[in-house]
Image: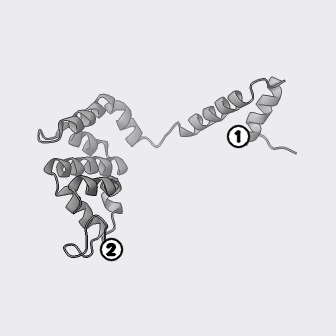
Amino acid sequence: KRSQAAKLKSNWRYILKKRANLDVTEYKSWRSFRQPKFPLLTEEMMVDRLLAFSPKLKLGYQYVHDLLEAFDNKDPDTFFEILKTLPDTLDEVLKEKLQNLINYEEGIRNALIYPYSNGKIEAKNTHIKTLKRVSYGFRSFVNMKLRLFLMNGLIESK
């Protein structure tokens, strides 16, 4: 018989998976939940069984996934409303980590409201730093600059 900890250890990926992405139609057998008692379960049913092991885990799961849904829907008001109304029964460590997000409220709100990102600029900076690291000792700065432009598609070779 498998312990609850072993079941959680082998199926933790499903707890982290977004609720909307859990499969509710395909029934299959799970190694953690053997045949006679639980013949076939969906992913959602299996996650429910895992959450039944601990009320604190179940409560934390609900709040974290509510936050993820608000974040995915780009709804800053709901996101911070959830953060500000966390119950006292929530695990202390999790509650502390979630409340740290309130310190960055302005930045998170901006990220949710505006469609802008500095991801492309950061990618270019990474390319430049990598090339500088690799090309230490380039004979000419002009050649290194040309190589950067070629890598980023700013110029084309003949």
**Mark 2 closeness class: few <14, some 14–19, many ≥20 residues within 10 Å:** few
- Residue 60, above or below 92: below
Q: Answer with left or right where residue 86 lies relative to residue 23.
A: left
Confirm whether residue 18 shows in the render.
Answer: no
**Mark 1 closeness class: few <14, some 14–19, many ≥20 residues within 10 Å:** few
Q: Return the disc, 2 or 1, that comes first in the chain's sequence.
A: 2
- Residue 32, above or below 121: below
* Residue 34 horizontal/vertical position (percent): 25, 70
Q: Residue furthest left?
A: 89
- Residue 74, above or below 34: above
The alpha-carbon separation of the residues under discs 2 and 1 comes to: 47 Å
The residue depicted at 74 percent of the width and 25 percent of the height is 136
Where is residue 145, by image quadrant?
Answer: top right
The residue depicted at 30 percent of the width and 34 percent of the height is 101
The residue depicted at 43 percent of the width and 41 percent of the height is 114
The residue depicted at 36 percent of the width and 36 percent of the height is 108
Where is residue 30, by image quadrant?
Answer: bottom left
* Residue 86 horizontal/vertical position (percent): 17, 40
User: Circle 2 sits on which residue?
Assistant: 28
User: Circle 1 sits on which residue?
Assistant: 152
- Residue 86, above or below 54: above
